[in-house]
Image (spheres, rainbow, N blue to C red):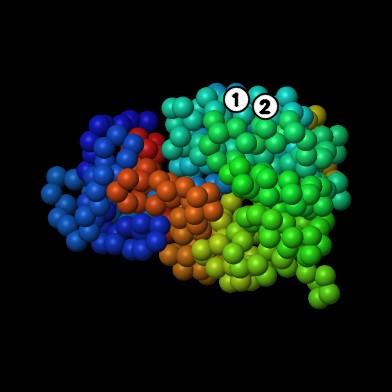
Amino acid sequence: MSQAASQTFFARRLFTGHQWLSDVLIEVSHTTITRLTPNAEASDAYVLDGIVCPGFIDIQVNGGGGVQFNHTPTTACLMQMASAHATTGTASLMPTVITDDITVMSQAAQQIAAVRQTAPHVFLGVHFEGPHLSAAKKGMHSQAHIRPLSEAEIALFCDPALGQVIVTLAPEMVTTAQISALTQAGVIVNLGHTDATFEQASEAFAAGARGVTHLYNAMSAMTSRAPGVVGAALYHQHTYAGLIVDHHHVHPASATLAIRAKGAQRMCLVTDAMAPAASDIDHFFYQGTKVVRDKDTLRLDDGTLAGSVLTMIEAVRNTHFDLGFSLTDTLQMATSTPAAYLGHQQAGQLAPGSYASFLHLDEQLNLLDHWVGGSRV
């Protein structure tokens, strides 16, 4: 990456994360945007034809670039993941720790705290997906490490050095008092890998849970008499949902219906990316289990989907071109909506004071160029 102390860009067409502007001068100082001036002249600025939008935010990233965070919870692993995903449009991410023992979780947390000291604009926090999950909906998560919520994990989740923390849990595995305590401490609680009833999910949302992790996948389905977690997520309008739009995890019709129900202000495009994403490797190991790439999916030996090789730019293209959602709504679901979900004021938008993380796209949504915190990728 290369970075100058002061830079000026000129965008013919710019999406701020909320609205479109034309002929915009973007003034950058170090990692931050200092001024946006629409209807301006290009003067001596670096001209960006096509589309400029905020860098994408991915709130569920298990790995990428050939490395898996659980397997190698190191600073080098995090930097390799971030660099790989940056080439596909992701400027900011929530590295995700899959169900594991407390030692691995603690090591991962230490590395998140370390990288945030120098790159808080890239590593917004950490997502703990498990270990307080339902065995009936565990997916690829290890049964050996699924367990109730203990004081040790609560202390880990509430560490302020980690930035924003997301915890995905099954509400039937914890109490509503525990959910309330976590949310009051600033932790975002998501429901996922759960066989909860509609009523249990609704109680969890009332206790402070903010949304669901990878909607439809690894959760009780919606039926006519039992709405399940899927029904609860769609019914409660204030909640957020992550959605994997790779056409394998969720049927395009189901994805379309969910986005229509939640709206672009509550739906976040996510990848659930594993080590092979943004790389050419064809398999990896998760706690001794081999996960194999099969074209554009990842599967266990029994055919179970095991995360994805999806990238954010692919999710955006799939949502806009295949599902038919407007470019405004699609880009919002990849930028300002996940920022709002995280409660983050500087990522996911282009405005004075926000991170100088933005993409240069053509009309076919090919990534032409990318700046992360003022540095060219």
Q: Gap in Å between the C-alphas at discs 2 and 1?
A: 6 Å
Asked which secondary structure carries label 1, the reply is helix
- Residue in the image at 44% along x and 64% along y: 327
**Which of the 4 image quarters holds residue 185?**
top right
- Residue in the image at 46% along x and 34% along y: 120
- Residue in the image at 26% along x and 32% along y: 4
Quadrant assignment for the N terminus: top left
Q: Residues within 10 Å of mark 1 (few under 14, many from 20)?
A: some
The answer to whether mark 2 and mark 1 are in CB contact below 8 A is yes
Q: Nearer the viewer, residue 106 or 317?
A: 106
- x%, y% of residue 117? 46, 27
Asked which secondary structure carries label 2, the reply is helix
Q: Which residue is mark 2?
A: 106
Q: Amino acid at mark 1?
A: Gln
Q: Which residue is mark 1?
A: 110
- x%, y% of residue 350? 35, 51
**Which of the 4 image quarters holds residue 2?**
top left
Quadrant assignment for the C terminus: top left
